[in-house]
Image (tube, rainbow, N blue to C red):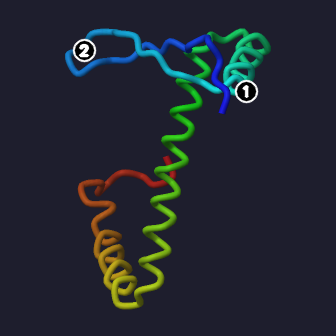
Amino acid sequence: MLYTAAYTVLRVWHEGGMMGTQMVRLSARSHGALARLAQESGLSRQAILDRAIEQYRRERFFDALDDAYRRLRADPAAEAEYRQEMQEWDGVIADGLEGVRSDA
C-alpha cells in the first residue's frame, strides 16, 4: 500500500490531561479524501477526523449492543430472565412521583 509523505497530526489528550500531538500515517487515498472533505466542509482536518472517530466508536458500540441482544434472543432462558427483570423495573418507574401529573 502506498503512503503519502505527508502525515496527519492529531491532537490527543494524554492521561495527564496535557494536549499533545501524534503522527498518523495515512494512505494517499485517505489523505486525499481528508483534504477534500476539509476543503468542501470548511472544517479542519482534525475536526473531520474527530467526527469520523466518534462516529466509528458509536457504530462499534451499537454493533456490540445488537450482537448482545442477538445472543440474548438465541438463549430462551436468558431472554425470559431478562424480560422478568424488566417487568420488575417497570413497577418502580413512578416511584417518588406521586401527585405529579402525567399530562403536564
Q: What residue type is disc 2 on?
A: Gly
Residue 39 lies, in percent from the top left, at 76, 10
> Tag 1: Cα neighbours inside 10 Å, few (<14), some, or many (≥20)?
few
**Could you say whether the residue bearing mark 2 is in a helix, strand or loop?**
loop
Residue 23 lies, in percent from the top left, at 46, 16
Q: What residue type is disc 1 on?
A: Arg
Residue drawn at the location 35% of the way across and 9% of the way down? 20
Furthest residue in direction left, as rendered: 16
Q: Quadrant of the N terminus?
A: top right
Circle nearer the N terminus (1, 2) = 2
Residue 57 lies, in percent from the top left, at 49, 41
Residue drawn at the location 42% of the way across and 78% of the way down? 72
Q: Return the residue at label 2.
A: 17
- Residue 30 appears in which quarter of the rendering? top right
Closer to us: mark 1 or mark 2? 1
**As drawn, is 59 to the left or to the right of 81?**
right
**Could you say whether the residue bearing mark 1 is in a helix, strand or loop?**
helix
> Which disc, if any, is residue 51?
none
Residue drawn at the location 61% of the way across and 14% of the way down? 45
Q: Decide: is 99 above or below 3.
A: below
Q: Decide: is 36 above or below 82.
A: above
Q: Return the residue at label 1.
A: 29
**Between residues 26 and 93, which one lies in front from this camera angle?**
26
Residue drawn at the location 28% of the way across and 66% of the way down? 92
In whole angstroms, how far apart are the C-alphas of marks 1 and 2?
33 Å
Residue 40 lies, in percent from the top left, at 79, 14
Q: Decide: is 87 above or below 23.
A: below
